[in-house]
Each structure stands twice: as structure tokens, then as C-alpha cells.
Image: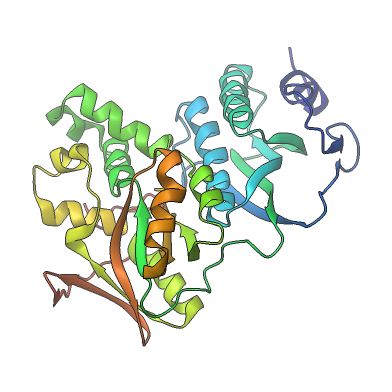
Amino acid sequence: MAKNEFDIIKHYFAQQQLQRDDVALAIGDDCALVNVPADYSVAVSTDSLVAGTHFLADADPASVAYKALASNLSDLAAMGATPAWVSLALTLPTIDEAWLAPFCHSFFELANQYNIQLIGGDTTKGPLSITLTVQGLVPRGQALTRRGAQVGDDVYVTGDLGDSAAGLALILNQSSSQQYSANLVTTLVDRHFKAQPRVNVGEALRGIASAALDISDGVIADVKHIAQGSEVAIDIDVEQLPLSAELLAFCGEDRQRAQQLALTSGEEYELCFTASVANRDALKAALAHTNVKYSCIGKVKAGSGLSLLQLGKPLTWQLSGWDHFVETNN
């Protein structure tokens, strides 16, 4: 039984994975040591998940672990980086092995899937929170950023949009879930907690996409980051937003409501990217092996800001991006 910080580290985190060849020293010293291949850059991202803000305190720990790591892997995917190493800082109110065991099992299962090794971190007592620092490798000069979109580029997203918001609504208002089938509820809740990091897509987009990011705050908020970073304007055609059958069922076939959820749903962790018209064939070929669908939802124009269009006409929907655990669009 784990009795203190060192017991937790030894029992749950040390020696849980096979060693990557580029890890010279991992858990157990003051710092980890890793070897970076020549002609590669290291992409680094840090993110925190806090109970009551990013997940409910009584949420399934396995789902929490998956979400924590997947959201950080998504940041690497957005840069076109291949996952390599991760550090974990875990704050726990008490040593709860019934919580730790499923958390660690889920965490390492996903880490092994993406060949990312835990190389260090910290455990401490306090309100439940999880902070991860992920590091990935990208060939020097090939990282995707938010700053390269050009006038005339197409705007794309992977997967479907809006399911995460629908899943969260069901989590927060369980009484409302009774009007839906159990299968629909399970599917949408899973899509909130268990989004698929698009690492293979990010790697495939190197040299093809002009700009990219992951959808963590909602398309309507995140596309603005590309527009601002690239100093361009972007039009989004709401009729081209990819909507799942499950989202439409959740919305009672109200397509406008589904479109608004697709625009504002945060924590989707799909990729949004731009690419030139000349690269359409290269894009199709590059993504063919990923088994991930992608949709063109808009166009890059001269100017600034973001505009929503429907059948070529401007929309005046007053929408905002993601605000954790605040239902502004349901």
C-alpha cells in the first residue's frame, strides 16, 4: 500500500513503460535526460486540468487520465510533432489507491499507444489537479504554426464537431439524458472524454498545411487565432460544418442548433488547418492513410477577423468560444 509520495512514485509511475532509446535517464533523479536527434526541434506544451473546471471531481479516473494526456497529445499534433516524452505533476487530496490504479492504467495504455514515455514529474497534496508537460520531435523547419495562412487558402477541420459539447451537457444535466437512448448518451459522453489525438494527421500535414491548431476552445474562437496570427480574414460556411448523426439526434434534428454547437464546442481536439488550392491533391494523398475524414469549411481572404456565412449570405449569430463548464449555447 502506498503511504507517501515516494511509495506512489515507485508503485504507480516508475518502471511502468518500456524505455525509449532516446531516454538516457528518466524517473528517479533531479532531472530527466533525453537525447534529441540531429536536425530535429523539440515541441513543448504544458497544460493543466483542474477538478471542477475541466472535469467533475467524481469523474471516472480512467477517463480523466485519458483526457489529460489526449489533450496534450493534441497540442503536439497541431504542430506536426511526433510525441516523445511527458512529465506529470499530480496533486491529490489524499492517497487514494482506488483512484490511482485506474488512472495510471488508462494513462499508460494511451502513452504506450503513442510511444510517449513518462520521464518525471511531481506528486503533492492538495485539491485534485493534473499538469502535464509533453515534448515531441519535429524535423527542423517543418513545424506547423498558426502564422502561415495565405489569402486564397482553404480552411479544413478533421472529424466531426460539436459532440464534445453535447457529451458535456449530458454529464452536467444527467436528468436530461433520460430522454435519449443509452447508446447515444454513452457515445457522446465518450466523445467528450475520449477524443482521438490526430497525431498521424499532424505528421502528414508537414509541408502541406500553411497553418494549423487544435480545436480546444471551439472553431469560432480557434479560427480567429489563425486569422490573427496570419493577419488575414477567414470566412466559415456553416453548411459545410461536419455534424455527426449523434449530434443531430441530440439536437432533435435542429440543424441550426447543431451548427452552433459545432462552432462553439470546446475540447474537441480535432485539427483545424489551412492549405493552398494547389495542395488539394497532395492533401488528399497525404491523409488517405490516416483513416481520418476531413472537411473544407471555409476560405482565407484579405482583411481581418472571422465571418460566418450560410448559402453565401452573412450570419449574425452571437456566439462565443468555450468556457469550461458554463453552458452558454445549449
Image position of 121 with respect to 133: above or below? above
Nearest to the observer: residue 41 or residue 329: 41
Image position of 32 with respect to 282: above or below? above
Asked if residue 254 shows in the view, the reply is yes
Image position of 187 with respect to 45: above or below? above
The quadrant in which residue 58 appears is top left
Q: Residue furthest bottom?
A: 303
* Residue drawn 33% across the image and 65% down it: 220
Q: Give percent across and percent down for residue 293.
A: 34, 45
Q: Residue furthest top?
A: 1
The quadrant in which residue 95 appears is top right
Nearest to the observer: residue 68 or residue 280: 280
Q: Give percent across and percent down for residue 269.
A: 44, 48
Q: Give percent across and percent down for residue 126.
A: 66, 39
* Residue drawn 51% across the image and 25% down it: 62
Q: How many marks?
A: 0
Question: Is residue 56 rendered to the left or right of residue 236?
Answer: right
Asked if residue 217 shows in the view, the reply is no
Q: Residue furthest left?
A: 253
Question: Is residue 56 rendered to the left or right of residue 91?
Answer: left
Nearest to the observer: residue 157 or residue 304: 157
Question: Colour scheme of this structure image?
Answer: rainbow
* Residue drawn 45% across the image and 39% down it: 289
Q: Give percent across and percent down for residue 87.
A: 72, 41
The quadrant in which residue 34 appears is top right
* Residue drawn 22% across the image and 47% down it: 243
